Image (spheres, rainbow, N blue to C red):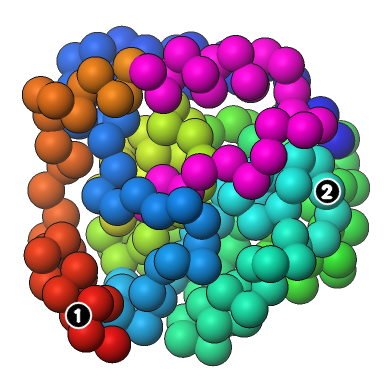
Amino acid sequence: MVQGFNFEAIKSIGKIIGNRSLLIPHLEFKDVRSIDFQRLKQMGFSAVLFDKDNTLTEPYADVIYEPFREAVDRCRGVFGEQSIAILSNSAGSSDDVDFREATRLESTLGLSVLKHGTKKPNGIEKVKEHFHTDNLQSIVMIGDRYSTDVVFGNLYGMLTIFTKPITSKGDNNIVKLIRDKESRYVDYCKNYYEPPKHSLFDKDRYNKSSASS
């Protein structure tokens, strides 16, 4: 299922210009295998929200990318199945007619796919509903896009983790173009801006604990 144009991301540009720290993730890794889920749980986080395409699966694939299966199982073991979900800009979004793709993918992926009917950085109400919480600071948002996944998480006070895309093969051509430009811009912004402060997270403590485990 190919993504349509994301007007919601365009509408968020004003917020980003006014606060460029929204683009900066709290943590960055090559992929989900490097994330210390146990440490995040110990720090007080209670739920994990994943992007789908190029974060857990190859673009528009319907199964977890094989090398990442163990990491997803590890996350499930730490947080519990009910505390993990996918928020995608394809399945479950405004592109997904009658949410047929989201329903199908819940079977093939073995994870809840939120049927939000919009695009990130919108969709927060379905996140609250699924996790039964208004305490958004306790949620970890993981994804491969700065302008959607990271901005979405930071807008609502989540911990944001950026992972590099799995592959450009099969990806939307518009997404490829935007990804390159936003990566260059975020690299520039990192020289001047820090990610938003987070009450549960201390990067030095996370790194020290992960290195010793």
Image quadrant in which you'd find residue 118: top right
**Where does residue 194 sit, x and y in percent of width and height?**
13, 37
Q: Is residue 184 above or below residue 48?
A: above
Image quadrant in which you'd find residue 20: top left
What amino acid type is highlighted by mark number 1?
Ser
Image quadrant in which you'd find residue 21: top left
Q: Is residue 176 magenta?
A: yes
**Where does residue 126 sit, x and y in percent of width and height?**
55, 51
What amino acid type is highlighted by mark number 2?
Ala
**Where does residue 41 sit, x and y in percent of width and height?**
32, 80
The numbered disc on residue 154 is none
- The answer to whether mark 1 and mark 2 are in CB contact below 8 A is no
At 29% from the left and 25% from the top, the residue drawn is 187
Q: Secondary structure at mark 1?
A: helix
At 46% from the left and 86% from the top, the residue drawn is 78
The numbered disc on residue 209 is 1
What distance separates the C-alpha of mark 1 from that of mark 2? 34 Å
Residue holding disc 2: 61
Can residue 26 be seen in this snapshot?
Answer: yes
At 26% from the left and 77% from the top, the residue drawn is 210
Q: Secondary structure at mark 2?
A: loop
- Nearer to us in this view, 96 or 196: 196
Q: Which quadrant holds the C terminus?
A: bottom left
Q: Is residue 197 above or below residue 89?
A: below
Count of numbered circles on the image: 2
Describe residue 87's horizontal placement relative to residue 102 as left or right.
Answer: left
In the image, which residues are magenta? 160-184
Q: Is residue 30 above or below residue 5?
A: below
Q: Which quadrant holds the N terminus?
A: top right
- Nearer to us in this view, 2 or 173: 173
Instruction: Please tell me whether mark 1 or mark 2 is closer to you in this view.
Output: 1
At 50% from the left and 43% from the top, the residue drawn is 164
